[in-house]
Amino acid sequence: SRSRLSLAMSDGMFDEIFLGLAQRHASIEELLHTIFSFFERRTDLYHVIGKEDRGAKMGFPEGVAEKMVLANFRKFQRKYLARAQPDLLARCAPAETPAEEAALARGREAMAHPPRQISPPAASAGSSADAGSQPSESSNQAPAPGGSSSSTAPPVSETVEKAKHISTWNGAVTDKYRWQQSLEEVTAEFVLPKCKVKDLSVKITNDQFVVKLKNEERFSGKFHDRVIVDDCVWTLEDSERLVVTLAKHRHTWWASVFEGDPEIDCTKVESTRKVHEYDDETQGAIRKIMFDQSQKAQGLPSSDQIRTAELMRNAWDAEGSPFRGQPFDPGMLNLTSAPPDSMFNASGSK
């Protein structure tokens, strides 16, 4: 259908936006919290359409939204497993059960109009008169029992302020800067007085770092390890945050950005990498391991066994072979242990 085609075409379209959002979170769980919190505050995903509200243009019939979320989770779980862990695909739940398919159909029908945007929750009683006078679709909701519904939520200003900064993924916050790292790069953020790019002087050598603001030194230090100077970059964001990205000379984990600063425990960093991030040789080795694991789970020969069987078949009928012209019979070979028949069946089927 047209709606499914549009969804498929949008895959990957917003990756840069979501990557920027993900970098500001320490884990997938925190990222999901932010996304579903947005759905609750600013969309009608959770709004339930009752039987008496048929034809309403806000929300979904009871249970439909939940099934939509689950169906999409299963759809992309299967897509990932088919690409990265095919041996687990058979154990994965179907992308859409009949009930979920029906729910998705109702959901697509309900989504003939764009998701309805909900105004932010009304400000608390202690806010200014101007803020309190703003109309809100959620202002007529009853407060939670025992007090305000926002009593446990962090202040909006605090959340917005936190979102301005880089995450501390595999890094930390010090009294001078905050930082994060991958195996290839380190990113550090320094908060400065309001300034312009022309006011800054940032000097990066393979082991030293110096920042000057209007010719006054604001920070200097020696790197934990050497960097590739030509691949290092810096930017000034919001006229007050200096963000520096350093390309590591060696792909190892840094305990700190600069010598003498507080160190993190490098044994606790999150070191997962995607297959495509490795060089071609390593990717080939990883895919070989994945193939062999899949073969083993199905009781089939490994890639090494298949290759050995091919060599044995070729040598059997080669020039000078005593077996040349005879039907292939692995039992006649002087092997320390007889290989499984499936090993030669797999080779012969190629």
Image (cartoon, rainbow, N blue to C red):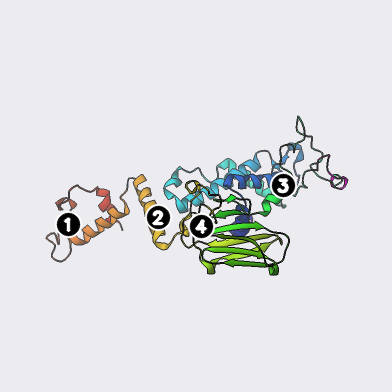
Q: What whole-number distance in Å separates the C-alpha atoms at marks 4 and 1?
A: 65 Å
Tell how many labels: 4
Q: Earlier in the sequence, mark 2 or mark 3?
A: 3
Which amino acid lies under the numbered mark 1 shown in the image of this protein? Answer: Pro
Which amino acid lies under the numbered mark 3 shown in the image of this protein? Answer: Glu
Find the magenta span and give its range.
122-131
Kindly indicate whether the residue at mark 3 contacts the one at mark 2 (C-beta within 8 angstroms).
no
- Crowdedness near tag 4: few (<14), some (14–19) or many (≥20) residues, C-alpha within 10 Å: some
Q: What whole-number distance in Å separates the C-alpha atoms at marks 2 and 4?
A: 31 Å
Element assignment for label 3 = helix
Q: Which residue is mark 1?
A: 327
Kindly indicate whether the residue at mark 1 contacts the one at mark 3 (C-beta within 8 angstroms).
no
- Was residue 142 drawn as part of the magenta stretch in this picture? no
Q: Earlier in the sequence, mark 4 or mark 1?
A: 4
Q: Report the disc number at residue 173.
A: none
In percent of width and height, residue 14 lies at: 62, 58
Left or right: residue 21 compared with residue 95: right
Front tag of 2 and 3: 3
Front tag of 2 and 1: 2
Front tag of 4 and 1: 4
Left or right: residue 64 compared with residue 144: left
Front tag of 2 and 4: 4
Please give the name of the residue rendered at 47% of the width and 47% of the height, measured from the top-left corner. 267
Which amino acid lies under the numbered mark 2 shown in the image of this protein? Answer: Ile
Element assignment for label 4 = loop
Q: Which residue is mark 4?
A: 224
Front tag of 3 and 1: 3
Q: Which residue is mark 3?
A: 158
Which amino acid lies under the numbered mark 4 shown in the image of this protein? Answer: His
Q: Report the disc number at residue 286.
A: 2
Kindly indicate whether the residue at mark 1 contacts the one at mark 2 (C-beta within 8 angstroms).
no
